[in-house]
Image (spheres, rainbow, N blue to C red):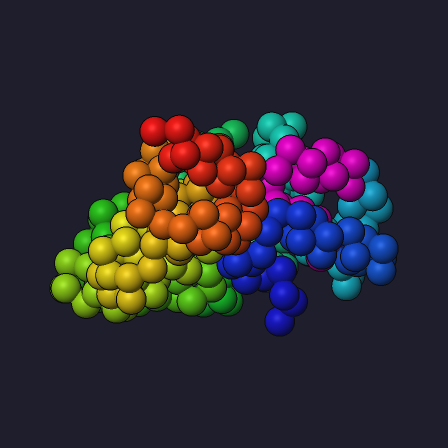
Amino acid sequence: MEAWRKFPVGKSVPSIIESGDTALHDGDLVAAGNWYVHAWRLGSAEASEKLRSLAPRLEELLDDPASGPGASALLGGIHLILNLAIERAFSLLLSAAQADAPEAMHGLGFMLAEGMGVPTDRAAANEWFRRGAELGDGFCAYNMALAARDGLGVPQDRTQFLKYLRVAAVRGIPEACALLADQHNTQNEEEDAFKWYLVAARGGHVPAMWVVAARYEAGLGVAQDAVMAVRWLLEMMNRGNGDGFHEALRIARGMSAEDVRRAGEMAGRTEDAEAILSVVANT
């Protein structure tokens, strides 16, 4: 299985883009584009520009029997991401889905579920989500989990909800990992809950970062570790969320300067760690 088919949990945006650049250098445009899509999902403007420049080259692959379905799925996704021609996006995704490209199925299902450029048809959307999930697509599995939980075009079914949710979580879909953690949390299964919150956090899920930080501070489901608590509070800033800074400052008041700096280094926020130390030193 191609590495890009699984959500790149724990990889930084620069390393994901580097994977895309490597694939592009090797001539694998479909792999390159899918790495860039992962980076785009994590908020990278650079990835958006790389996808824009890649689109014309993908057009040349559409008639290739070997790479055509993957190129069509990716190009359809790019049209959605960049808000280009919606009708063309649907046509490209439908063609790829009919050729059993699972990455096209979650895009196609999304368009049908939301009525984007086509009449809303949740039943048809679920059929594509179901097929994609059977082929191992994590996003399709996550959408089927939500459908079974909320009764969206299918009967509510907790067994099916958990079945598809686990498939999506194993594929590294951050939202699925966080939701699976919530299920363990309601059963007071603290270690399992922490494990999945951590996977979600490593996948860029900001609410999970907050929970992971709180659990590291409290020692809930994991050994107490103030360094890791501050690390994850600072990590939120990499996703454009500064809400954890003051909590990090509060925890840092009881830490050594060395440990605060270590937390900042792990989060890639060394300047913020120094800012915290400056505030602590002056109060």
Q: In terms of image quadrants, where is residue 113?
A: top left
Expressed as whole percent of the image width and height from the top left, the position of residue 11 reads 58, 56
**In the displayed structure, does residue 54 sit left or right of residue 179?**
right
Q: Nearer the viewer, residue 41 or 156?
A: 41
The residue furthest front is: 282
Q: Main secondary structure of the magenta part?
A: helix
Expressed as whole percent of the image width and height from the top left, the position of residue 17 reads 69, 49
- For the question of whether residue 250 can be seen, the reply is yes
Q: Nearer the viewer, residue 41 or 246?
A: 246
Quadrant containing the C terminus in the rendered view? top left
Quadrant containing the N terminus in the rendered view? bottom right
Q: How many marks?
A: 0
Q: Nearer the viewer, residue 173 or 283?
A: 283
- Image point (15%, 58%), residue name: 186
The residue furthest left is: 187
- Image point (28%, 62%), residue name: 224
**In the displayed structure, does residue 283 sit left or right of residue 41?**
left
Q: Nearer the viewer, residue 51 or 146?
A: 51
- Is residue 34 on the magenta stretch? yes
Q: Which residues are magenta?
A: 30-54
- Image point (64%, 33%), residue name: 45
Expressed as whole percent of the image width and height from the top left, the position of residue 123 reads 35, 47
- For the question of whether residue 42 can be seen, the reply is no
- Image point (73%, 52%), residue name: 18
The residue furthest bottom is: 1
Q: In terms of image quadrants, where is residue 70?
A: bottom right
- Is residue 110 on the magenta stretch? no
Expressed as whole percent of the image width and height from the top left, the position of residue 192 reads 27, 68
